[in-house]
Amino acid sequence: MDEFVIMGLVLQEIEYGESDRIIKILTAEKGLISAFAKNSMRLTSHLFAACGQLCYSEFVLRPGRNADDKMYTVVEAGYETDFRDIIYSFEAQGVAMYMVEYTLGLSLADQPAEKELKLLMNCLYMICKKKADPKIVKAVFELRMCCECGFLPQLLCCRDCGAYDGERFYLDMEDGHLLCEDCAAKAKVVCNLDKGALFAVRYICLAEDKKLFGFRISASSAGYLFAVAEQYALAHMDKPLNTLKFLRSLSSWDPDQKQTKD
Ligand SMILES: [Zn+2]
């Protein structure tokens, strides 16, 4: 196979030897790929800037010698932009790294990942430009990424009676069905969404890409949204996420905040 040009977001850089790096790049066409970037740790290397974590760059890649060699070699790399303006708060950094780790945990190798890449870049952009609260970005990312991966919850109405509207609902974390307050009581499960949170979940899962962040939510409903989005995302991820531990260690990330905030 010949060299080819591809755009991609560097999700991970692993130092290798004195000055080399192995990078994991998320691309629209080929999903998640690994590439060896020789000498790219050297400041003088033309690969240095373009191969850093959270850089979106144009790569010229050479495939391995045989078909089952999944490691590409970076021949050239041109820096386009990056999403590294996250150091203004631990929370912003934590959410960005969590989204990256979550994406790395998805099975995105050797398959197109255009929607996943677009969503991740959109969410990172919102954090870098301080256009949304990192907690909101995290919830949007979690629910929307599950939808992109084929786990769209059944949000239209209560599974058992067809009720569309109500003060409280239950969203099942495993298969994504919805129950109204009465049907949840019959099923002996505790409601985990109020009206505002259900509106937001429906919005996030069904809105066009461009309008993904175009909803408003009260502080009390946001507490429900954050909890449900995280639980739903974790129910569809089979690996432990180290970045979540970091987020939970932050004082601004008190899970009981929802009871005291409004
Ligand atoms: Zn019902």
Image (tube, grey):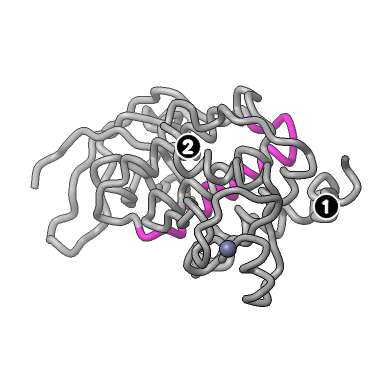
Name the mark nearer the viewer: 2 or 1: 1
Examine the structure image and report whether residue 101 is included in the region drawn in magenta. yes
- Which secondary structure, mark 1? loop
Q: Whole-percent x and y of residue 176?
A: 50, 62
Q: Quadrant of ligand 1?
A: bottom right
Q: Is residue 231 left or right of residue 148?
A: right
Q: Which residue is mark 2?
A: 52
- What residue is shown at x 62% (from left), y 60% (from top)? 180
Residue farthest toward the left in the current orientation of the protein = 1
- Which secondary structure, mark 2? loop
Q: Whole-percent x and y of residue 228?
A: 64, 56
Q: Is residue 214 left or right of residue 46?
A: right
Q: Is mark 1 within 8 Å of ligand 1?
A: no
- The span from disc 2 to disc 1 (Cα, nearest Å) is 32 Å
Chief secondary structure of the magenta span? Answer: helix
Q: Is residue 209 left or right of residue 253?
A: left
Dot 2 amino acid type: Gly
Q: Quadrant of the C terminus?
A: top right
Q: Which residue is mark 1?
A: 254
Q: Is residue 134 left or right of residue 250?
A: left
Q: Is residue 241 visible?
A: no
Q: Which residues are magenta?
A: 86-107
